[in-house]
Image (cartoon, rainbow, N blue to C red):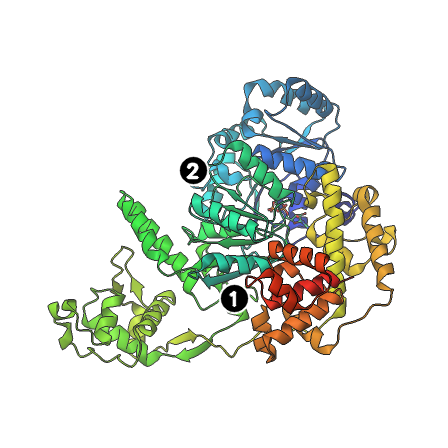
Amino acid sequence: MASLQQSLKQYFGYDSFRDGQEEIINQALLDRDLLIIMPTGGGKSLCFQLPALLKKGVAIIVSPLISLMQDQVTALQDNGINATFLNSTLDFKELRRREEDILNGKVKLLYLAPERLVSERFQEFLHTLISTVTISFFAIDEAHCISEWGHDFRQEYRQLRQLRFRFPSIPLMALTATATTRVQKDIISQLNLKNPGIHRFSFNRTNLYYEVQPRQKRTYQQIFNLIRRLDGSGIVYCFARKTTEDLASRLSQDGISALPYHGGLSDELRSKYQNSFIRDDVRVMVATLAFGMGINKPDVRFVIHYDLPRNIESYYQESGRAGRDGDHAKCILLYNPNDEYKIHYFIKQKENIQEQKIAYQQLEKVLEYAETNYCRRIVQLSYFGERFRGDCDGCDNCLNPKAVEDWTIEAQKFLSCVARVQEKFGIKHIIDILRESKSDKIYKYGHHLLSTYGIGKDKTAKEWEYLGKSLIYQGLLNQTNDSYKILKLNKESWEILRLKRQVKIAVANPTQTKIIEEYNPKALEIEILLQRLKKVRKKLADQENVAPYVIFGDSTLKIMAQMQPQTLKSLGKLSGVTEYKLNKYGYYFYEEIIYFLSEKTLPVALPNHTQIKTLQLYQQGLTITEIAQKRGLTVTTIITHLSELMELNQPIDIDKFVLPKKRETIINLLKKIGDQSPKIIREKLGDNYSYDEIKLVKAWHKRS
Ligand code: ADP
Ligand code: ZN
C-alpha cells in the first residue's frame, strides 16, 4: 500500500504534510470523530480530502455557500479527482445524472448544502447510498455556523444535529477557523461528537506581514503609492460606498486596474466584478466589508484597511483574506487617532448599555493594536487567548524596533497625579494638571492647589498622552470601559509608586534601518522568469475558463522559477505538481523555461556597480527620492540610473513613475518626431510633463 506521503504527492502534488495534518488524517482513517480548529489558509481541506480518497465509499462534505462548493469541486476536478456537488443551481436532468454517478461509485467527494442533506426527500437516496457504495464520513466545513455564539450562525446548520441520530455509525469531522472556545464547545455538543480528536492550532498566520501607517491627509496619494509598490492582487476595505467608487475610479485612471464592490451594486455587477478579480483581469477590489465572505481567491497578496476595524476579530478575519495559499502577503491598516471619536459616536447610538460596554472594550483593543510599539501579534493573538512572545519578524514594529527608555520617574509623576484626584478623572485632565493648565475645570475642582500641579511642564502634552496610553496598554494602569475613560490605579500602578517596578517605554528610533540585501543577479533572473510563467498561467486559465490559481498556485510557480527544471520529469517532481497536472499543463511551462534559458545565453550587456545599487533599492520598493537620500546622490542621477537600467532590459516598471496616459502621449510624439532631446520634446508637450518623465519614457521606448 502506498504511504500517506506518496498519496499526498499523487493527488495534491505536495512533498510533505503541514503541522498536524498527518495526525488528523490518520485519526480520520481510524473512523474517529474529529474537531479541527485551524486558521484560514492552514490547510483544512486536505484533512478531509485525502481521507476521502483513501477510504472506502463516498465522503459527504457540508459547505454553507454554493460558490465555495463550486470552487472546491472545480479545483479537485482540475486535479483529476472525482468530486461533485448537488445544489439548487442544477436542473433536474443534471441532478439525476450526478446521482447516478454517485450510486455507481464514481464519486469520492460529494459536496452538499446542509438543507439538502437533512431534507426528507433526500433520505431515501442516502440510505440507498449507504447500502451500496457506503458513506465514509461526514465533514462539516465552517462548522461554527452551527453555533449561535459564532459570528456566522445559520439556521440550516442547526439541523445538522440530526446526523448523529440518523447515522450513528458514520464518523463526523467538524472544521472551523473560529477562535472562541465557547463556539468550539458548542460545536461538539450540537453535533454530538463522540470522544472527538480535538486539533487546535495557533491562530498566528506566519505568512502575513502586519503594518499600521498613520492615515495621511492626502489619503488617495498614500494608497496609490502603497499599491504601486506592492505585487499581485489586493483588496482595499472602506467603510463608505462612495469611497469605494471614488477610489476605484481614481486608481483606474492612474493605471492600476480596480473595481468597486458594495451592497448598492446590482447582483449582476457584483458577481461580474468578483469574477474579474478572481480571474486576475482586475488587480484591486475597493470594497465595503460585504466583500470577501463567499469568495475563494487564495492568492490575494495585500489587504489595506482605509478605516478602523470594529474589533480585533473582524480585523483578523478581513485582513486574513490575504495569503490563504500560504505565500507571503501584507496587511496594512491606515490609522488616524481621530477615528476613535467617530466610533464613539456610533457606540453612543446603541440603546443597550451592555452592548455599549462591549463595543467600548473592543474599540480599546483595536486602538491598542494600532498604537502599540511592540509586536502587533502580541495584541492580536492575546485577543484569542494565546500568549505570543513577540519578535515575530513579520510586523512593522519587529522589523523596525523602537528604542526602549526608562520612564519610571515620569510614570510616578503621572500616577501620583491620578491618586491625588481620587481616581475620578481621565487622561486629558491629568495632563492639564501636570502641565499647569489654567482652564476653568482645573480651578473649579481646586486642582491648581495640588502638589502635582505643573510638575510636568518639561514634557509636551503629546508625550504625556503617549506615556498614559503606554501604561494602559502594558496593564500598569486601568481605564473604565465607558466613554468617560476614568483612570484607576491597579496593583502594578502602586508598585511603580512604591519604586518596586520600573517603566520602560518604546520610543521612535530613526537610526534603525533595515539590512540591505546583497545584489543577487540570480534573484533578478528568477523574478523575470516568474513574471513570464504567470503570463503562461493566465493564458491557460483563460482558455480553460478557470481562475489562474486553479492551474498552479503562486508558490508552485515560484519554485519553478527558482529550480528551472529542464526536463518534464524534473518539473513533475516540484511541490504542487501532480502527475495529472504535469500531463495537462506541464509542457507549456517547461517550454517557457527552455525559451527563457536559451535567450539568457545570448550575450547581453550587464548593468554596472552603481546602477545595480540603485536597482537593489528600487526593488525594495523605495521611491526615487528615497533612493537618492539613501545613496547620497541627486534625484537626477537616480533617474539616469533607472533610464540606463531600462535600456539594459532590467525589470523596471515604468508605470511606477509615469502615468500610462502621459507615457502614451510621449511615445506617440517620439514616433512622430524621432529621437529628439528632452528639451525639444518638452517644448512640444508643455509644463505638465517633467524632464524626468520624458527621460524615463525615452529610455523605456528604446529598450530592446
Ligand atoms: P483552509 O481551508 O484552512 O483555509 P486550505 O485547505 O484552502 O486552507 O489550504 C490553504 C493552502 O495551503 C492551499 O493553497 C493548499 O493547497 C495549501 N496546502 C495545504 N496543505 C498543504 C501541504 N501539505 N503542502 C503544501 N501546501 C499545502
Ligand atoms: Zn511582530
Query: Looking at the picture, how far across and down is residue 588, in whole percent?
Result: 82, 47
Residue in view at x 35 percent, y 59 percent:
338
All told, the count of numbered labels is 2
Lower sequence index among marks 2 and 1: 2
Q: CB at mark 1 closer than 8 A to ligand 2?
A: yes
**Along the viewing direction, whichever of 449 and 192 lies nearer the viewer:** 449
- Alpha-carbon span between mark 2 and mark 1: 36 Å
Label at residue 86: none
**Along the viewing direction, whichever of 105 and 698 lies nearer the viewer:** 698
Residue tagged by mark 2?
148
Judged left or right of residue 461, residue 197 is right
Res. 211 visible in picture: yes
Residue in view at x 44 percent, y 69 percent:
373
Residue in view at x 36 percent, y 66 percent:
475
**Along the viewing direction, whichever of 681 and 438 lies nearer the viewer:** 681
Q: Give the position of the C terminus as an image quadrant.
A: bottom right
Query: Looking at the picture, how far across and down is residue 24, in whole percent?
Result: 64, 46
Query: Looking at the picture, how far across and down is residue 419, in whole percent?
Result: 22, 71
Q: Is residue 115 above or below residue 436?
A: above
Residue tagged by mark 1?
396
Q: Which amino acid does the dot numbered 2 rest on?
A: Glu
How many other residues sit within 10 Å of disc 2, few (<14), some (14-19) or many (≥20)? some
Q: Which amino acid does the dot numbered 1 rest on?
A: Asp
Mark nearest the camera among 2 and 1 is 1
Judged left or right of residue 652, residue 585 is right
